[in-house]
């Protein structure tokens, strides 16, 4: 019973961080696209933080919590925000900006969460310490980790991840067109990398460096 209560408490702490990180990531894709001339996400009602508009049962809830409970990097996704890359101002540069907006949002959220976490000890000894300050501090700690993991993972250069879009945007046109053909196999490539643990080898060091950099920036 104790293990069950601990698991429920952990989910209550981690769930808001995971859901908000994923949703903010997707919304910012749409916001940047709108600023660059594509209102597809706006017309679809996706420029909102309302979880109902974004949550994918498997990608937003089941997958990240299963990975968390098994001690693996927390990966997840929301329903992709629709973007019509053909109408973006700037062509492939516009695509790069839209793609980079999601991971950059996660890194900003990680830094903000770290700053909040830094000031939380001052509130631990008050009357609301055990009931408010301590759970909030744990939530901010989870937010730092989740946002770094999500940001780093999405920058992995495999289509259709954001990192793949960024790479497509900077490759010479002929190479970019050839690279675009790999998108149909992107999910299978990611599954293979996860199964063989090569993805862990590729992203864990980057995650650790990012977490170390954020800790240094906010002096945790």
Image (spheres, rainbow, N blue to C red):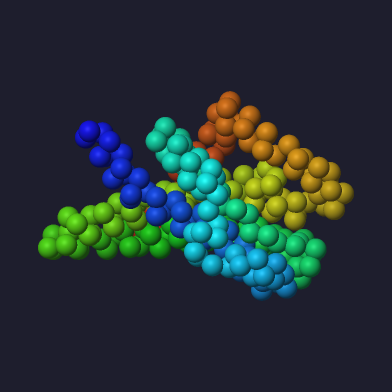
Residue 93 can be seen in this image: no
| Residue 33 in the image: above or below residue 70 | below
Left or right of 33 in this view: 71 = left
Q: Is residue 142 visible in this depiction of the protein? A: yes
Query: Is 123 left or right of 214, judged from the image as shown?
Result: left
- Of the pair 212 and 147, the residue shown nearer to us: 147
Is residue 33 or residue 58 the one in the foreground? Answer: 58
In the displayed structure, would residue 87 be above or below residue 171? Answer: below
Q: Position of residue 165 (x, y in %)?
A: 70, 52
Considering depth in this image, is 183 or 60 the residue closer to the camera? Answer: 60
Q: In this rendered view, identify the residue nearer to me: 220 or 42.
A: 42
Q: Which residue is drawn at 67% across and 70% down?
A: 43
**Identity of the residue drawn at 55% across and 57% down:** 54
Q: Position of residue 9 (x, y in %)?
A: 28, 45
Classify the position of the C terminus by image quarter: bottom left
Location of residue 180 in the rendering, given as x and y in whole percent from the top left corner:
79, 46
In the image, what residue occupies the spot 33% across and 50% down?
13
Q: In which quarter of the image is residue 170?
A: bottom right
Screen quadrant of the N terminus: top left
* Number of numbered discs overlaid on the protein picture: 0
Left or right, 205 with reference to 84: left
Q: Which residue lies furthest to the top in this view?
A: 196
What percent of the width, then of the height, locates residue 96? 70, 59
Residue at (17% x, 55% y) in the render? 130
In the figure, residue 101 lies in which quadrant?
bottom right
């Amino acid at each position: 019973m104790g293990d069950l209560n601990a698991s429920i408490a952990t989910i209550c702490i981690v769930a808001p961080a995971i859901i908000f990180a994923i949703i903010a990531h997707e919304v910012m894709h749409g916001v940047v696209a709108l600023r660059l001339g594509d209102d597809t996400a706006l017309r679809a009602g996706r420029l909102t933080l309302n979880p109902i508009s974004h949550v994918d049962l498997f990608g937003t809830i089941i997958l990240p919590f299963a990975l968390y409970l098994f001690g693996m990097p927390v990966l997840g996704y929301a329903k992709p925000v629709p973007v019509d890359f053909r109408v973006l101002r700037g062509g492939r540069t516009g695509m790069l900006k839209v793609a980079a907006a999601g991971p950059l949002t996660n890194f900003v959220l990680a830094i903000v969460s770290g700053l909040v976490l830094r000031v939380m000890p001052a509130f631990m000894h008050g009357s609301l310490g055990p009931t408010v300050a301590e759970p909030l501090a744990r939530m901010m700690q989870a937010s730092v980790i989740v946002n770094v993991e999500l940001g780093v993972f999405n920058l992995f250069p495999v289509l259709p991840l954001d990192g793949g879009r960024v790479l497509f945007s900077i490759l010479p046109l002929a190479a970019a067109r050839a690279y675009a053909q790999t998108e149909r196999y992107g999910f299978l490539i990611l599954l293979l990398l996860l199964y063989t643990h090569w993805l862990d080898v590729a992203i864990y060091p980057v995650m650790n460096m990012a977490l170390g950099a954020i800790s240094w920036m906010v002096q945790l």
